[in-house]
Image (cartoon, coloured by chain):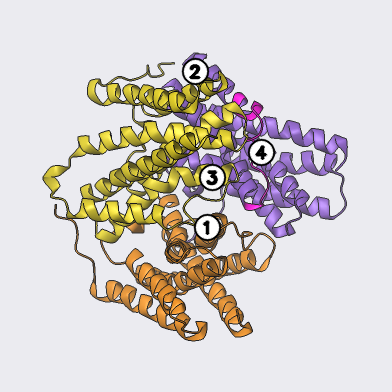
Chain colours: A yellow, B purple, C orange
């Protein structure tokens, strides 16, 4: 991997962690929780997906030997705690989540490819990286998991993740494949949030 | 392990994955989900238990370096998606689940024994392999987990798994111990489905 | 680590497993479950947190190569099953849980420090060790997770865990830092149970 790709990965990672952490803290805010619960939800949402990915591909879990990942989650949760409520609303949670979804899908697929798993597995790892944290957040907040809500969500992650894997296998450099795939996934998710875009449901 | 045992394990594994994947896809169908959610539930249910087992016994996670396991889940979910609804009903989910439960209990215990864990742990690994995917499916579908439903379920997995470990420790060859224990577990679960067989509940 | 510290860790571990297992079995009793479900809940609650910790810090999962941990959970669940119901009540579950919370926070942080993770991570590992089993229990029992209940819970674990890490880094020997931090966490949780001590909730 080139230094540029490596550096881009690092910032995609920070972006994913921070926005997911914010969506977790906002879920805690919505449920009128305490500062400690804010930190807990921010951390679970921010690092849950990447943690599951690392365990599955047998990589060292990315936040265990650093302090900055957890610190990011703690700082974000404190910032949300201190911000007046009118700055945030349910829509805001969705948009934060959408940015994290796109960034983390690509990042997760890229890391998995770097660990030499099969292309299909790498695409799935992107989805896991992007979706698992939000699922943990929903299950722990006793909300219907985002997985069973009708709008496009996993699909957007899968599109970004699979798009990145296909572009990379086709020889496209990371600095192009990464942003391209992330923007593609974000647009799909944005259409779901703004226009209610959804896949057809099963009718038997 | 003899080649025969190894091959039998391989097919038990496919059987477990496919039927659990079908039960996951059927849960998605019941909830009127999209094709992507079908694939998600089929995969979680099909590979969730084995994944947890592999993480716990420190084996490489079985589907990460292959493509055929995930492909099986995707094919099964597409098949369920395309099949007319009247082919399936709640009973069908139960029966698919019962076959997977029996096959996967034995397979999980066998794999754990092959990794040299203690006999009690191996029996528990069989239960985890067989039950965890279904539990993940229930939790994510926001259904009461199968664990807290009164009928025999974990018990059947434990019977198959422990039966296999005991037979193996007693020197019984795999080709006999495997089918025998799986059929034993299946019969228990079948009695639960067909006749409501259940363990006594706590009355204090 | 001195033999004394090592031995103290061993007994803290047993204490944590047994009381968490009891709280799991009591949750099963409250839900009028069967003996098999008692064992399942006792095990999940007793070993869930430590299992997650070990996976994250890449330690061999502590109960896989022994039989005594699972045996402890099975014995405890059988004991709860056999005990008349009037011996137990909802309060009892809380108090068992509080002891386990304090003991396991310290134990988890100590083990993580021994594996060379960063201090912040070690403190978080204490919280995970103490809280994850109870969270698994609540999610599987379809109860609101203890994380989103208003009273002090994670906070007490975090206090014990962070207190232990700070004392240890300051050079305090294990035999003093351990009990001191555990008692500190227990008092916080006890005040929550007995007097409803809670952190301020978010008001926006």
Chain under disc 1: C
| Label 2 residue SS | helix
Q: Name the residue under label 3.
A: A54
Query: Quadrant where the N terminus of chain C lies?
Result: bottom right
Q: Badges 4 and 1: C-beta atoms under 8 Å apart?
A: no
Residue at left offset 35%, top offset 36%:
A100
- Taking the image as drawn, is residue C80 in sight? no
Q: Quadrant of residue C147?
A: bottom left
Instruction: Please state the horizontal and vertical placement of residue A175, each as a whole percent of the image.
Output: 44, 28
Read off the magenta span: B56-71
Q: Name the residue under label 1.
A: C44
Instruction: Please state the horizontal and vertical placement of residue C103, each as a whole percent of the image.
Output: 46, 74
Q: Name the residue under label 2.
A: B81
Give the number of the mark in front: 2 or 3: 3
Instruction: Please state the horizontal and vertical placement of residue B25, each as a whole percent of the image.
Output: 51, 27
Relative height, residue C192 to residue B31 (above, below):
below
- Is A3 situated left or right of A138 in this image? right
Dots 1 and 3 on the same chain: no
Dots 3 and 4 on the same chain: no
Dots 2 and 4 on the same chain: yes
Chain under disc 3: A
Q: Name the residue under label 4.
A: B62
Return the residue nearer the eye: C71 or C180. C180
| Label 3 residue SS | helix
Cα separation, mark 4 vs mark 1, equals: 23 Å
Q: How crowded is mark 1: few (under 14 residues within 10 Å), some or many (20 or more)?
A: many
């Amino acid at each position: 991997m080139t230094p540029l790709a490596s550096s881009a990965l690092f910032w995609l990672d920070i972006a994913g962690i921070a926005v997911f952490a914010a969506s977790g803290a906002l879920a805690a805010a919505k449920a009128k929780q305490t500062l400690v619960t804010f930190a807990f939800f921010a951390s679970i949402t921010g690092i849950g997906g990447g943690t599951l990915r690392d365990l599955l591909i047998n990589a060292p879990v990315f936040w265990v030997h650093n302090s900055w990942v957890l610190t990011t989650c703690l700082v974000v949760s404190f910032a949300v705690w201190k911000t007046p409520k009118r700055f945030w609303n349910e829509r805001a949670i969705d948009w934060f989540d959408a940015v994290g979804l796109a960034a983390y899908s690509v990042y997760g697929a890229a890391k998995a490819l770097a660990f030499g798993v099969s292309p299909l597995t790498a695409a799935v790892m992107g989805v896991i990286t992007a979706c698992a944290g939000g699922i943990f957040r929903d299950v722990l907040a006793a909300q219907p998991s985002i997985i069973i809500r009708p709008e496009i969500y996993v699909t957007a992650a899968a599109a970004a993740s699979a798009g990145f894997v296909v572009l990379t296998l086709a020889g496209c450099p990371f600095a192009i494949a990464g942003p391209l795939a992330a923007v593609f996934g974000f647009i799909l998710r944005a259409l779901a949030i703004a226009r209610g875009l959804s896949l057809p449901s099963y009718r038997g």
